[in-house]
Image (cartoon, grey):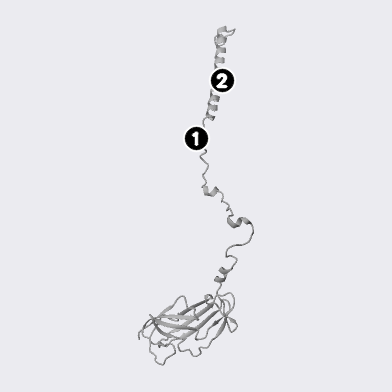
Amino acid sequence: MDTLRNPSGPLPASTYWRRRLVIIGVLLAVVAGVVWACANNSGAEQKPTGAAGTPTDIPTVPADTVSPTPTPTPTGTGTTGTGEPTGTATTGTTSAKASPSLSTRNGKLLCPASDLRVSVRSDQKFYSAGQQPKFTLIVVNLRKKPCYVDVGSSALGVTVISGKDRVWSTVDCAKSPAEKLRRFESGDVYTATASWKKTRSAKGCPATKGTAKPGYYVLDGHVGKVKPEERSVFVLEKG
């Protein structure tokens, strides 16, 4: 039995030739496969064209972010290189117009009107028949340097108006209308107060007077020619 499973002795010559042919066939198949693979790879590298060769993962950038800013080219008289300024810049007229005109009185520098802020207010919005309205006028110096303001009773005051009717004003019967220059530091605030007996008045302080009727009234004021940006409104109620 062992002799049948493992025969001994030389094999026929045809057997050896078949084995050799099989080995040679396998080697030729391997070589042919390698040659075919190389040929395909070289052909694939030569074919990319158009959009297929463009990477798709590169973000696009807006053109205005990469375009260089054009450098202005000097033209006209600027190419002469003289360095001399031209135009009206050297005249200083712009700065002169922007600065308020300054004036003096008795050797004292007056505050420009553009540097003053004036406001008025009443102590209440509604007044019954037995109440007298009280008014406040406030002056503020916005100038960075000290200056003077006329706060005399003829230059500074409050006025009560009803429609187009000028009802009453502190300047009509001022007892001391003389000039009164007051020094204002930068940011200085000046306050003046007045009470109204609900009587009418007129310029020159005539003797004949009337009484204000119930209704809406507007409070105005002034310091020289400077007036408040906003007026105050109050009401005289019926008795």
| Relative depth, front residue between 192 and 81 | 81
Q: Quadrant of residue 180?
A: bottom right
How busy is the neighbourhood of tag 2: few (under 14 within 10 Å), some, or many (20 plus)? few
Task: Single out the mark in the foreground, 2 or 1.
Answer: 1
Q: Position of residue 149 (x, y in %)?
A: 55, 81
Residue shown at the point (52%, 75%) measured from the top left: 114
Q: Is residue 2 visible?
A: no
The amino acid on which the numbered mark 2 sits, given as a three-letter code, is: Val
The residue beneath circle 2 is 31
Identify residue type, mark 1: Gly
Q: Residue at x 56, y 20 (%)?
A: 31
For the residue labelled by badge 2, is the local secondary structure a helix, a strand or a loop? helix
Figure check: 86 above or below 222: above
Neighbour class for label 1 at 10 Å: few (<14), some, many (≥20)?
few
**Depth order, front residue of 177/217:** 177
N-terminal of the pair, mark 2 or mark 1, is 2
User: Which of the pair 30/6 is nearer the observer?
Assistant: 30
Vertical comparison of 146 with 79: above or below: below
Q: Check whether the beta carbons of the residues at disc 2 and disc 1 lie within 8 A of each other.
A: no
**Mark 1 highlights which residue?**
50
Residue 230, how many percent across, how many down?
45, 76
Percent from the top left, x then y, of residue 238?
A: 35, 84
Is residue 139 something that shows in the picture?
A: yes
Nearest the camera: 81 or 195?
81
